[in-house]
Image (spheres, helix red, strand yellow):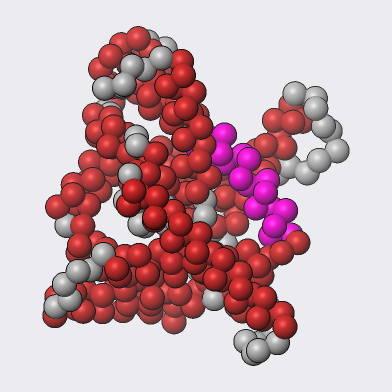
Amino acid sequence: MKKKDNSFFAILFLKSVLMGTVNKLPGISGGLVALITGFYLEMINSLKKLDHKAIKLLLSLNFKKLDKEYNGYFLIIIFLGIIVSYFTTSQLLDVFFQSYELNVWSVFFGMILGSNFILILKIKKWNIKSFFLIGIGVLIGLLLTISEPLPENKNLYFIFFCGFISVCGMIIPGLSGSYLLIILGNFKLLLVDSVNSLYNSFLIIFGIKSDIYHDIELVKIVLIFALGSVSGLVLLSSILSFLITNFEKTINQLIIGFVFGSLFIVWPWNYTLESFNLSYQNLLLLLWILFGFLIVLIFNKYAKKY
């Protein structure tokens, strides 16, 4: 095992920032980045060890024992990297959503398609079971699509649930936690608006700026979301790693069907009054979809390499 000196933790921090950033993009999971950059297995094994004793050690600031028994420094650096990524990425996404919303949704759509395409390529042998599982996934996705679209929901119990479920993308390579948030209707609220509001609150508290917008309700929301995410990461890591280890093909096939069935939710033209036709604007959006598709293929190429 590589010696864990300052340079190791510095590189791990940068990898964690990248993982957290990518996890906010629908179609690519943070777990895939952890896999590519070489700390996925240690992260999953360390998360599986966490229990109430680890929380007590953390609250008592007994970092030495926490590191010895739970690989504490390793996990703390990962959590810090993810937190930093949320602030930096949310600022960029906010700018893009304000000025290029249709382009953003087009890239997201392409990334989700690319992710599904890669999962399809993983199926080396097609049989009745494969089609059946994909069909079940499609049915679940379609039920979500034809149902009343989930609106933005600020209920704190629902926010906690969103955080709890969205961390699946960090544990299961190929499943995008951000895509789940889009389906739940809270992508922009949780990954852009609330994070930016917390960021602005820090700027106001430290006297850096005083004329910027921040919403106390949104600050509360992002804290509850973070609590749900940490809870999900700790409680689901053992279950999800067991499932992905023992039933990877089954899970991948269900995800393929689910994504195909629910794709209309992220169809870019849902966010414009203009219908889909071969206009100049729509041809540009198709190019952005292709761009998103290619991004995922490039990530997958490096995943295979490592």
* Residue 288 percent location from the top left of the image: 61, 69
Is 302 placed above or below 52 here?
A: below
Q: Name the residue located 80 percent from the left edge and 27 percent from the top edge.
A: 208
- Quadrant of the snapshot with the C terminus: top left
* Residue that sits furthest to the front in the current view: 305
From the viewer's perspective, is 21 left or right of 202?
left
Is 281 placed above or below 122 here?
A: below
How would you classify the magenta stretch by its main secondary structure?
helix
Q: Name the residue located 85 percent from the left edge and 38 percent from the top edge.
A: 211
Is 31 placed above or below 10 here?
A: below
Q: Name the residue located 46 percent from the left edge and 19 percent from the top edge.
A: 7
From the viewer's perspective, is 227 left or right of 196?
left
* Residue 236 percent location from the top left of the image: 29, 44
Is 81 placed above or below 295 here?
A: above
* Residue 124 percent location from the top left of the image: 19, 69
Of the pair 105 and 54, the residue shown nearer to us: 105
From the viewer's perspective, is 188 left or right of 178?
right
From the viewer's perspective, is 182 left or right of 274?
left
Residue 128 quadrant: bottom left
Q: What stretch is highlighted in magenta?
A: 82-98
